[in-house]
Amino acid sequence: MTEQSDEDLVRQCRGGEVKSFDMLVERHQRTIFNLALRMVRDSDDAADIAQSVFVKAYENLARFDPQFRFFSWLYRIAVNESLNALEQKKRFEGLEGNDLAVDSADEKDDEAVRDEKRIQDGLMLLKVDQRAVIVLKHMQGLSYREIAQVLDLSEKTVKSRLFSARQLLKDILKKKGVRRNDRRTDS
Amino acid sequence: MTGEQIRELIQRDVDGDLSPSERRALDSALRRNAAARKLHSELKTLGTTLASVRNAEPPPNLENRIRADIRSRIAPHPSRRSWIESLRTLVRTPTVLRYGTVFAGGLVTGALLFMFLIHPQPVAGVSGEAATGTLISNAESYSVDVHGAKGTLTAIPTEAGKELTLRIACAAPTTTKLTFDPSRVKLENVREFQSTGGPVVVNEGVVTVTGTGVQGCTLSFSGVRDSRITVQVACTGGGTFTRDIQVH
C-alpha cells in the first residue's frame, strides 16, 4: 500500500480523522525532538517542546496553508517553541552567559561522544538565530529556500546568517579541540 | 570575481548547491587565492564534523504523551463546520433533499423528546472526560463519574514495574458490585468489601485496589440504575497509564 503523504493526512485530519494526525506524530516526532534538542540541549525540555509543537500544530491545523510543506510548518513551530523555551529559561534561571562556561564533555566518554558534546556546547555559544540556521542546514538538511520559509527570512539573509554562524562555530570548535569526525552512524 | 562572490560560491559548494560552470569558476578562484582555499577547507571540515552528530532517540513515551495531550483537547475540531454554516448549506440544497432532511431532523428531535421528557431514562456514560474507550493518560491521576448500570475499567501502567492505584468511591445509597481478578491485584482496605471471592458488594465508602506491573488493574462494576461511582486512577511515582472504560 502506498504511504500517504503528509498533505493527505492533514486533509483527513481537517475532516475530523484524529488518527491521521497520530500518523503525522509518528512520522515527525523524532525529527522535531532532535531539532528542539539541538536548540535547547536539554533532553527533557526538548521532549516538552516536541509535545507542545504537535499540540499547537493540531490546534492550528485549520490555519495551515497547504501551499507550504507540512514539515516546514512544523519546523517553524518547533523553532518558535524552542526560542520561547530558551527565553523562559533565561528569565526564570538567569542563565544568560552561563553557557559560555559549559564544557559537558566527560573524560569517561569516548572521543566521538566527547566531540558530540563539545559540538552541542559550541552550538549553545551561538546566538539563537545563528544556531537555528546551523541546525536546520546541517542537522535537518534543509535547503536555503526551506530554511527561509521556516524562519520567514529571505534566502539572501539565510545565506549571510549561515556564513557568519559557520565562521563563528568553526572557531569555537577549534578552541574546544573538536577533531574532524567522519563517522556518521545515524540510525 | 569579488571576495563576496567567492565566499558565496564556497558556501554553496559546501552545501552541494553549485552548477558545473559555477564549480569550474570556484576551482579557478581557489587555485589563485590561498585565503579562499583555507576558508573552503575549513568550512568543508565543519560540514563533515556537524554531519557526524548522531540523532538522539526521543524518550520512549513521547509519542504516547503527545497523543494523550491531543486527545485530552479534542473538543469539536476548529476546522469542523459550525451549525450556522451547516444550516446555510441546507438552505442551498435541492428542495426534496431539504424537506427530507427537515423531516428526518424532526423525527430525531421527537425521539429525543420522548426519551428524555416523556419517558426519562438514566443515561449510561461517563462525565469529566471526552469519551469512553482507551485513553493513554499523561496525568498523574484522573477521576471520572460513572453513571449507569454496569461497565468495566482497565488501567495499566505504561512502564513495567510501576504501581497503580484505583480508588472507587460509591455515593450512598448506591449499591455497587465490583469484580476483579484477585490473582493480579493487591487489595487494600479489604474491610470495605463484603466478600473476598467473586463479586463483592460495596454499599458506600472508598475502596482502593492496587495493581503492579504491566497487567495493571481490571475492574468490572455493576450498580443500580443511575448509580454514581467516582473512579480515581493514579500511578505512583508520577508514571503514565492507559485506561479503558466501558459503560453500558
Image (cartoon, coloured by chain):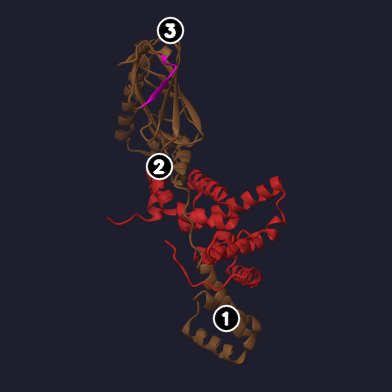
Chain colours: A red, B brown
Q: Which residues are magenta?
A: B185-190
Type of amino acid at the residue the image marks with label 1: Ser
- Secondary-structure class at tag 1: helix
Q: Answer with the quarter of the image where residue B159 lies.
A: top left
Type of amino acid at the residue the image marks with label 3: Pro
Q: Answer with the quarter of the image where residue B156 lies.
A: top left
Residue bearing the label numbered 3: B173
The quarter of the rendered structure image containing the N terminus of chain B is: bottom right
Q: Chain of mark 3?
A: B
Q: Residue at x 32, y 30 (%)?
A: B99
Mark 2 or mark 3, whichever is nearer to me: 3
Q: Label for residue B41?
A: 1
Question: Looking at the image, can residue A23 be seen?
Answer: yes
Q: CA distance from mark 2 to mark 1?
A: 49 Å
Q: Residue at x 30, y 34 (%)?
A: B97
Q: Which percent across, then down, holds residue B225?
A: 36, 12
Asked whether B210 or A3 is in front, the reply is B210
The first of marks 3 and 1 along the sequence is 1
Q: Residue at x 55, y 54 (%)?
A: A36
- Secondary-structure class at tag 2: helix
Q: Are marks 2 and 1 on the same chain?
A: no
- In the shown orientation, is residue B72 left or right of residue B92? right
